[in-house]
Amino acid sequence: MRRVSYLFLCAIPVIVGLLTGIRALRVPVLHDVLGMLLFGLIVSSIWWLARPACDSRDDLASVVRASGILLLLPTALIALFWVGLATPWEATASENKMRYAVLLAGSISATVGLVLLKEALTVSGERLFSTLAFAASLLSGAAYVGWTSFQLGDFALRLGSGSLSPAVASMNNVFDGLLFAASALAYAATAAFASALARVGWLGRNGSRAYVALSLVALVLLMLRGVSFPIPGGDPEPWYTRPGFIVGIPAAPWLMPYFLGVLLIRRASVNGA
């Protein structure tokens, strides 16, 4: 069950991406049932994978395990609430309000998870890359909280007034800078954490290089796209064919930390920290 749970959790981002992108699934009751089923399977898999192989009171392993679980939580919340949600321009104002509430909760969870990871790495003797990653993750988390809070308030106002406030709409370009900073810092933090994990032997050298390379590629694509988030429909090409758009999707920078979380839970439970 531990191996099955590990493989299932590794496949979850693909499964969640497919289920959230199919708008036809946004049928009353159906999307609720699918979301609860998927969330239940994720929680069960985390429980099986997180169980220590033997009775242990290792505090460091507990911190590593908690860090991993918190890094998985944003994706688990997306699985629960986002079945059939599709893109923001396809969803209703009420659904988008829920979308940004989930993103706000996810940004807090991911930030706290990375703070715990930094503590575990410091105890294990790694201070350079973990400190750099810690600083970047805190700044990223603060920017995420600011941006998602603005978006959440925007859609709350839309539901209350029935229309988009021109004053709020004019601030979107300003807040695009926060999302850009949050995403860029999240990719930088991932690269630094991967390097730190390799230095303490919790991640293989090849795995660390892969995380660093992917993070840097995503960061370059994000910078080439620019600070402003592209308006859907403003480009003749579909959004899913534009790498710069994809890496800037608010939940995209959490993808690599998710897989780090799976590895951390597995390590803490099977080998200890």
Image (tube, rainbow, N blue to C red):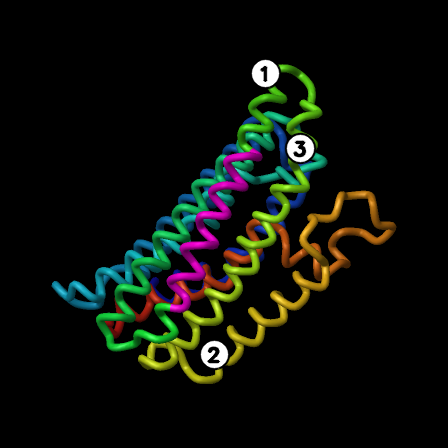
**Residue 258 or 129: which is nearer the viewer?**
129
Q: Amino acid at mark 2?
A: Gly
Residue 207 is labelled as 2
Residue at the outermost right position: 236
Residue 199 is labelled as none
Q: Residue at x 47, y 43 (%)?
A: 145
Q: Mark 1 Cα within 10 Å, few/some/many (few <14, many 20+)?
A: few
Residue 33 in picture, x, y percent from top left: 50, 34
Q: Residue at x 67, y 26 (%)?
A: 167
Separation (CA) of disc 2 from disc 3: 37 Å
**Which quadrant is the N terminus positioned in?**
bottom left
Q: Find residue 36 and report its image quarter.
A: top left
Q: Looking at the image, is mark 3 or mark 1 earlier in the sequence?
A: 3
Q: Amino acid at mark 1?
A: Gly
Separation (CA) of disc 3 from disc 1: 17 Å
Q: Amino acid at mark 3?
A: Ala
Numbered circles on residues, count: 3
* Residue position for label 3: 91
- Magenta stretch holds residue 249: no
Residue 13 in picture, x, y percent from top left: 54, 56
Residue at the outermost top position: 161
Magenta-tinted stretch: 132-151
Q: Is residue 77 left or right of residue 121?
A: right
Q: Mark 3 Cα within 10 Å, few/some/many (few <14, many 20+)?
A: some
* Residue position for label 1: 160
Residue 212 in picture, x, y percent from top left: 52, 75
Q: Find residue 152 and report its image quarter.
A: top right
Q: Nearer the viewer, mark 1 or mark 2?
A: 1
Separation (CA) of disc 1 from disc 2: 48 Å
